[in-house]
Image: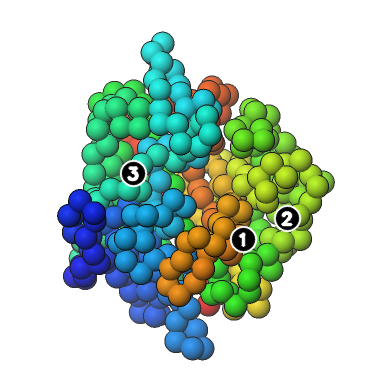
Amino acid sequence: MKPEHFGVTEDGQDVDRFELRNRNGVIVSCINYGCCITNILLPSASGHADIVLGFDDTTGYESDNSGQGAFIGRYANRIKGAGMTIGGRDYKLTQNDGANYLHGSLSKRVFTAETESDGTVIFKTISEDGEDGFPGNLKITVKYTLDDEDKFTMEYLALTDADTHVNFTNHAYFDLAEGIDETIENHLLQIESDVFLEATDDLIPTGKIIPVDGTPLDFRHQKTIGRDISSDDKHIKAGRGYDHSFILNLPKTKAPILAAEACAPNGERSIRVFTTQPAIHLYTGNFLDGTLKGKGRVFTRRSAFCLETGHYADSPHHPEFPTTLLHPGEEFHETTVLQFGF
């Protein structure tokens, strides 16, 4: 697998594109800018269907503010007040979501990249002490692999030289119907979760865990994404649709567990999500407003959805949540697997 030149950043860095293929005709493309997944092509009657949004060139990804296909860190999701305390010391984080912190800046850098004989692409970088306000020099490794069982594996590893909070995810925007419908509301979705995190109007967890039973957030049995998306329920109204973290049912294990399954309206294509992480965040593209364009499409409201595996939002302020604190000498290691059906 040889890298292909994809473009040059504004500051003159070369961006390369890597293409992973399997014997069944699945193709996953990614670039070393933000470890972005640019294409996921599944075999179809017309040749291939691209099931993720994205851009045609480096400029598109540099100017993007929605995280299309990107690796997210240092801390995926929100941290209240853009601040946290570690070991009695206060840290001020980047304030980029109203008064809060959201996602961080790792999606906006060029990673080093290398390939292995099995087709794995390995991206590496060092997030320096103080970046986005976080303490510690953080050595980060991201691995992407596609196998012949149509499983695409995203593996995240990190080491630190100071106590720091870490939470990684991928922010791919899926549309399994490849734009045939105006929105993804007719997609079918099931999430392996009995509870979700209650959040405030600015989408910060209150710390309360709410049963999904009897709410529009009940995806324990397959239903269309749009069935309850316009509900008057206060949780739905706060996010202008789905923008919620679901706590997964099964205990955290070393092996990835089934977290969710999404299907195209006609059932032609599907994704099963497996993860070692304790939660999955469903985002239904509520803030896409038509200003972004790529690969011949306009990204309009609810034209795609994200299934972001990770830890809970705002964990630094909630000691009762699974910890995201990483200490020197420990290794952060989480895995998420997408299994494609077509």
Query: For the residue labelled by badge 1, is the local secondary structure a helix, a strand or a loop?
Result: loop
Disc 1 from disc 2: Cα separation: 10 Å
Q: Position of residue 118 (x, y in %)?
A: 25, 66
Q: Amino acid at mark 1?
A: Arg
The residue that appears at 42% across and 65% down in the rendered structure is 54
Q: Is residue 268 above or below residue 138?
A: below
Q: Earlier in the sequence, mark 1 or mark 2?
A: 2
Front position in the image: 272 or 292: 292
Q: Earlier in the sequence, mark 2 or mark 3?
A: 3
Q: Position of residue 56 (x, y in %)?
A: 35, 69
Q: Position of residue 243 (x, y in %)?
A: 62, 47
Q: Is residue 225 above or below residue 1?
A: above
Query: For the residue labelled by badge 2, is the local secondary structure a helix, a strand or a loop?
Result: loop
Q: Is residue 257 left or right of residue 209?
A: left
The label on residue 302 is 1
Q: Amino acid at mark 2?
A: Ile
Is residue 145 visible in the rendered image? The answer is no
Q: Earlier in the sequence, mark 3 or mark 1?
A: 3
The label on residue 229 is 2
Asked whether the residues under the numbered discs 1 and 2 touch, taking CB atoms below 8 Å apart as contact, a structural biologist would say yes
Query: For the residue labelled by badge 3, is the local secondary structure a helix, a strand or a loop?
Result: helix
